[in-house]
Image (cartoon, grey):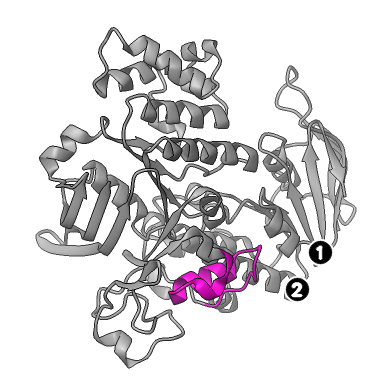
Amino acid sequence: MLDIRDLSVSFTSYSFGLKRMEVCVVRGLDLSIAPGQIMAVIGQSGAGKSLLAHALLGILPRNARVEGQMSFKGKPLTPYRLSALRGREIALIPQSVTALNPLLRVGGQVTRAALLSGISKKEAPATVRQAFVRYLLPKGVAAWFPRQLSGGMARRVLTATATVGMADLIIADEPTNGLDPITARESLGHLRELADTGKAVLLITHDIEAALQVADMVTVFHAGATVEVARAEDFKEPGNLRHPYTKALWNALPANNFVGTMKPIARASNADGCPLQFCCNDQDSVCGQSVPMLKRSGAGWVRCHHA
Amino acid sequence: MLEASSLAYRYGKQHPWLFNELDLRITPGEIVGVSGPSGRGKSTLAKVLAGYLPPGKGSVMIDGRPLPASGHCPVQLLFQHPELAVNPRWKISKILREAEEPTPVILQTLGIESAWLDRYPHELSGGELQRVCLARALGSSTRYLLCDEITSMLDALTQVHIWRVVLNLARSRRLGVLVISHDKTLIARLCSRNITCLEGAAALS
């Protein structure tokens, strides 16, 4: 469905008047999703997760430069094709209710999403009604304003907005943020249902435990690069994990050992070599020389000189 | 000892009590967890205990005396979103000195780098900013720390790093810590005792 190879995003900015600076934020991002699959993308804040979503929707700011190959349903994803596809075949479930217009009733906003995704004016009301039924939203909710929705209801409205137009690729940005466990599980359950109907779901989150509940595959981002692609079941047994960062992440979970075996550093070093070379325990002279390539390892992929 | 006796709070007279007849004791060096679904008054409880909100009924006492009305409050509250708890127009160095000059030992144990001092809050990541907030809250007269979901926005590795620091400080400075989280496994890891917030009341367990 979606295939991303070696994506990089850099921003140009000006400091001290006309001195131009280029900051590379994402480099070496690889990702692919098949229909019917939930691909979880996990990584800490600042790892480039949201930039990935923005690049996929073509909504990066103007000073951003994107390089690399993206293809959707076998054809390359050009900026022109992107603007035609977003909202129709690629849909985003945003992080919070702030994405809704606070001054419009939610029913109207879901209807507008349906119209924009190419559903005719005649069919739209029925489609919207079905979407409300599907997500167990009572009839009266259509006349509510976003501020009247509870956290769980807001998630359901946002999910309805994204899925009303029958998009094939759904991007869910932090769907469990700020929700209590019951509402979070419900929100993840909806993503599973969507995947089971043959859609591809990209689940962007920092919460591994939540992601592992529903995902089929997990892509781990760190410092702007894909460091590992693993099956969700690989996380049951730490011996199956490939990259030192993923192993450290596993050890840090409260349900496992709750120890920090790796220093948390935020930014990728713009120097040559592995982006993790300053915080990794397994580093040696090789790590400073070249950026490791993403290589096949069992059912997954890993980017490390020593794996 | 931080002691709340028959505490109650509601937002306005027409609203129901969020919690009522709540008794809570935190002794120095003790780590107490609070869990429960959203909307049950966990964060409100923290705000009342820290003196941000006046209690509707009951009282909050520290060693038998009420919280001081001015000066450094010995009960410090840390929030879920550190970026909303700092002045966005201040540099990190000024934020750190908001209460008092942090000691080099605290800066070192929290891993606050000197390169951050000249930056603005939006130039730090969530985990880094949370550590800055922690350093600001750990003034010399701080004795109780209320942590309201302080790591729920952070990844597991940053989370473990922050809690290790808090646990060490609680032990070495004999701080009493209240941990509010919806993550039951995290609370089981950290706390010696857990309180579950239920509708209208608090059940001690």
Q: The residue tagged with tag 2: helix, strand or loop?
A: helix
Res B131 quadrant in image: bottom right
Which disc number belongs to residue B30?
1
Give the magenta-colored segment's residue range: A236-261
Chain to which mark 2 belongs: B
Three-letter amino acid code at the position of disc 1: Glu
One can see residue B111 in this view: no
Kindly identify which residue carries mark 2: B171
Are the residues under badges 1 and 2 in a single subunit?
Answer: yes
The answer to whether B52 is drawn above or below residue A266 in the figure is: above
Three-letter amino acid code at the position of disc 2: Arg
Which disc number belongs to residue B174?
none
Q: Residue at x 12, y 62 (%)?
A: A20
Residue farthest along the top direction in this orientation: A122
Q: Using the image as rendered, state which of residue A204 and residue A102 is in the foreground.
A: A204
Residue farthest along the bottom direction in this orientation: A285
Name the quadrant of the C terminus of chain A: bottom left
The picture places residue A113, in percent across and down from the top left corner, at: 32, 22
Q: The residue tagged with tag 1: helix, strand or loop?
A: loop
Callout 1: few (<14), some (14-19), or many (20+) C-alpha neighbours within 10 Å? many
Res B57 quadrant in image: top right
Q: Using the image as rendered, state which of residue B136 and residue B163 is in the foreground.
A: B163
Q: Earlier in the sequence, mark 1 or mark 2?
A: 1
The picture places residue A154, in percent across and down from the top left corner, at: 50, 28
Side (left or right) of B109 relative to A199: right
The picture places residue A138, in percent across and down from the top left corner, at: 56, 15
Res A5 quadrant in image: bottom left
Q: Residue at x 45, y 38 (%)?
A: A196
Chain to which mark 1 belongs: B
CA separation, marks 1 and 2? 9 Å
Magenta highlight on residue A287: no
One can see residue A296 in this view: yes
